[in-house]
């Protein structure tokens, strides 16, 4: 095996994997180093497994409310081992497919182990199968991702807490799942396990859920989650955990200044994520990080060390799979196709896969007003959407922020069945400069959810 490479990619996530293949196909001797699984968080612990399980949870939800549509089912049951098996099969299919593609790529070596810089362009690898290996390279690309933040709470190390990774390995439904953190990860898992039959309580320390979203959007999601039977405590913190001899966990919670004790069977920590940089030895390479450990980069994703790039969650910014992948396309095209792309002004769409979904793009109302922009707001409830009424999916809303003078769409939030797909229609309009007044009278196929974009923009009085 080579000891010197043209390029070394550390981390086989959604940027590292395609980048390593592309570099090798361009004739560069390349090594891809991964300490765990090919595919990174998305394939192994994030998008792929959770959305597979969300599909099972939605099937349970539909079975539970089928009487509303005139279809009567004499009971149903949750088969958690089968749900986990299906999820595992999908994950392995994605992971192994990526690994096989890497193995077939000429000029590419895949090495499993943990890499640490020993100098400006040298690394040492603790190999997973034992021993170490010393390598050098002309260029490095860091895609090591992020890992859950574990809060400093008394007794937390005594309770076998769950993270977004370990909760995926449960083959039985918790009797009571306590979730610390009421943001995107906590909400998806909370609704999912409630639909599987668990009692679920979410503890959120902020004065309201999802503080980055507009208040009406956050309130809508909170109402939906609570309607599904999830208990939500806001302005609340956990002060102490105690595990008794039977395995039950007592959590002392302060909510609104009032202390109470909640007994649960499982605790999920969903309080955020931190970059995986601690053991990289970045100081030896001259790579600087910020106060949270994120790798500093310029707009072209190059770090403070020439020839070393950082991509995806490890560098901070929007922590989404599609942003990580876009980082790869920017770096590769700039280095090998002579382009000059940067990370400024690219769209940052995202979707939270509660049911109904939240699809978001662009500026929120609160962001636009903070910037002092002259805006108009279009908003309608999903209860006014014909397709929603016909399918029994009337929870949620459509909301758009537009420039009052130019009529350009500045942002949108869609909470509804296929909310992410509807949001994408507006994203394409934003990218193409299509103004809201044109969408108002656009001919959409009937009856679609997207057809109600007509009605959404009719809500604006010119």
Image: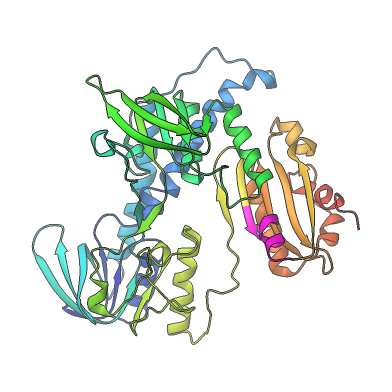
The residue lying at 44 percent from left, 24 percent from top is 198
The quadrant of the picture occupied by the N terminus is bottom left
Residue 204 horizontal/vertical position (percent) = 49, 40
Q: Can residue 81 be seen in this view?
A: no
Residue furthest out toward the bottom: 338
Q: Which of 146 and 4 is in front in this view?
A: 146
Q: Which of 167 and 369 is in front in this view?
A: 369
Vertically, is 344 above or below 81? below
Residue furthest out toward the left: 131
Find the magenta span and give its range: 360-372
Q: Can residue 130 be seen in this view?
A: yes
Residue 294 horizontal/vertical position (percent) = 38, 66
| Left-right relation of 366 to 115 | right
Q: In which quarter of the image is residue 82?
A: top left
The quadrant of the picture occupied by the C terminus is bottom right
Q: In which quarter of the image is residue 106?
A: bottom left
The residue lying at 24 percent from left, 59 percent from top is 35
Residue 207 horizontal/vertical position (percent) = 56, 42
The residue lying at 77 percent from left, 61 percent from top is 402
Vertically, is 235 above or below 212? above
Residue 449 horizontal/vertical position (percent) = 73, 44
Q: In which quarter of the image is residue 428?
A: bottom right
């Amino acid at each position: 095996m080579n000891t010197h490479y043209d390029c070394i990619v550390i981390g086989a996530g959604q940027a590292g994997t395609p980048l390593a293949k592309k570099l090798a196909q361009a004739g560069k001797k390349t090594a891809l180093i991964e300490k765990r699984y090919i595919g990174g968080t998305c394939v192994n612990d994030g998008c792929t497994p959770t959305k597979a399980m969300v599909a099972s949870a939605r099937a349970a939800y539909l079975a539970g409310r089928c009487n509303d549509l005139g279809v009567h089912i004499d009971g149903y049951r949750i088969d958690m081992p089968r749900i986990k098996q299906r999820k595992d099969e999908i994950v392995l299919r994605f992971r192994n497919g990526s690994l096989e593609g890497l193995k077939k790529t000429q000029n590419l070596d895949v090495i499993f182990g943990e890499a640490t810089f020993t100098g400006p362009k040298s690394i040492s690898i603790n190999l997973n199968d034992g021993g170490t290996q010393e390598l050098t390279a002309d260029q490095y690309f860091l895609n090591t991702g992020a890992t859950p933040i574990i809060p400093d709470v008394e007794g937390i190390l005594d309770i076998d807490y769950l993270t977004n990774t370990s909760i995926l390995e449960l083959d039985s439904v918790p009797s009571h799942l306590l979730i610390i953190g009421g943001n995107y990860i906590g909400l998806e898992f909370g609704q999912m396990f409630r639909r599987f039959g668990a009692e679920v309580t979410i503890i959120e320390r902020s004065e309201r859920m999802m503080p980055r979203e507009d208040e009406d959007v956050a309130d809508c999601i909170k109402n939906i989650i609570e309607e599904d039977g999830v208990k939500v405590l806001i302005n609340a913190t956990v002060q102490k955990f105690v595990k008794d001899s039977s395995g039950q966990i007592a959590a002392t919670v302060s909510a609104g200044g009032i202390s109470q004790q909640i007994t649960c069977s499982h605790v999920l920590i969903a309080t955020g994520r931190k970059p995986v940089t601690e053991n990289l030895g970045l100081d030896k390479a001259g790579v600087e990080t910020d106060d949270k450990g994120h790798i500093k980069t310029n707009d072209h994703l190059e770090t403070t060390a020439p020839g070393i790039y950082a991509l995806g969650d490890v560098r901070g910014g929007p922590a989404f799979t599609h942003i990580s992948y876009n980082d790869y396309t920017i770096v590769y095209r700039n280095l090998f196709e002579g382009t000059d792309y940067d990370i400024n002004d690219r769209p940052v769409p995202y979707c939270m896969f509660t049911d109904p979904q939240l699809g978001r793009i662009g500026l929120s109302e609160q962001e636009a007003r903070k910037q002092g922009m002259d805006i108009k707001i279009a908003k309608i409830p999903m209860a006014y959407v014909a397709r929603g009424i016909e399918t029994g999916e009337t929870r949620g809303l459509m909301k758009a922020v537009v420039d009052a003078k130019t009529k350009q769409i500045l942002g949108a939030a869609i909470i509804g069945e296929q909310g992410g797909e509807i949001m994408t229609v507006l994203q394409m309009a934003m990218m193409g400069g299509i103004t809201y007044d044109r969408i108002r009278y656009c001919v959409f196929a009937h009856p679609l959810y997207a057809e109600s974009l007509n009605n959404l923009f009719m809500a604006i009085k010119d």
